[in-house]
Amino acid sequence: LSLDVFDYTAEILALAIVNAVVVTSPEAIFLFGGLAKAGDLLYEPLNKYVDKLIQPVFRNTFKILPSAIPETNAAVMGAAALAWKEL
């Protein structure tokens, strides 16, 4: 059952990632938090669904990576980036 949950989560997340890639054409998508720490339980089905859903022109143009930002710093860094952008 738990593997089914990871698979379903990966499918939904893949759809969101594919939509973001089509609109923004990023070089990388960074995942953050507890789910991103799931390792291959998440990344294997996620990559499978992204490959299935992505338009061929976008295939292999970006990477899906875990964030290296410590969880305790994320909110502060996001707020600082927003403040920097607004100045």
Image (cartoon, rainbow, N blue to C red):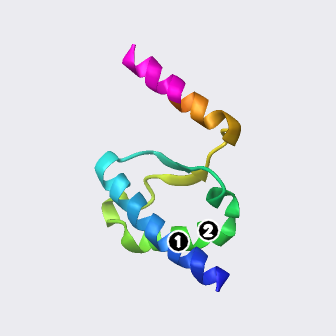
Taking 13 as reference, is 66 left or right? right
In the image, residue 63 sits, relative to residue 47, either above or below, namely above
Which residue carries the number 1 mark?
Answer: 9
Query: Quarter of the image containing the C terminus?
Result: top left
Secondary element type, mark 1: helix
Q: Quadrant of residue 14?
A: bottom left
Residue 26 point in image, percent of width and height: 41, 45
Residue 50 point in image, percent of width and height: 45, 67
Q: Nearer the viewer, residue 50 or 75?
A: 75
Residue found 29% across the figure and 50% down from its top: 23
- Circle 1: residue type: Thr
Taking 75 as reference, is 50 left or right? left
Mark carried by residue 42:
2
In the image, residue 80 sits, relative to residue 74, either above or below, namely above
Of mark 2 and mark 1, the one earlier in the sequence is 1
Q: Quadrant of residue 19?
A: bottom left
Residue found farthest to the top: 87
Q: Does 41 appear in magenta?
A: no
Secondary element type, mark 2: helix
- Circle 2: residue type: Leu
Residue 49 point in image, percent of width and height: 46, 73
Mark carried by residue 17:
none
Residue found 40% across the figure and 61% down from its top: 16
Label 2 crowd (10 A; few <14 / some 14-19 / many >=20): many
**Could you tell me how far apart the alpha carbons at marks 2 and 1 are, in whole angstroms?**
8 Å
Taking 51 as reference, is 40 left or right? right
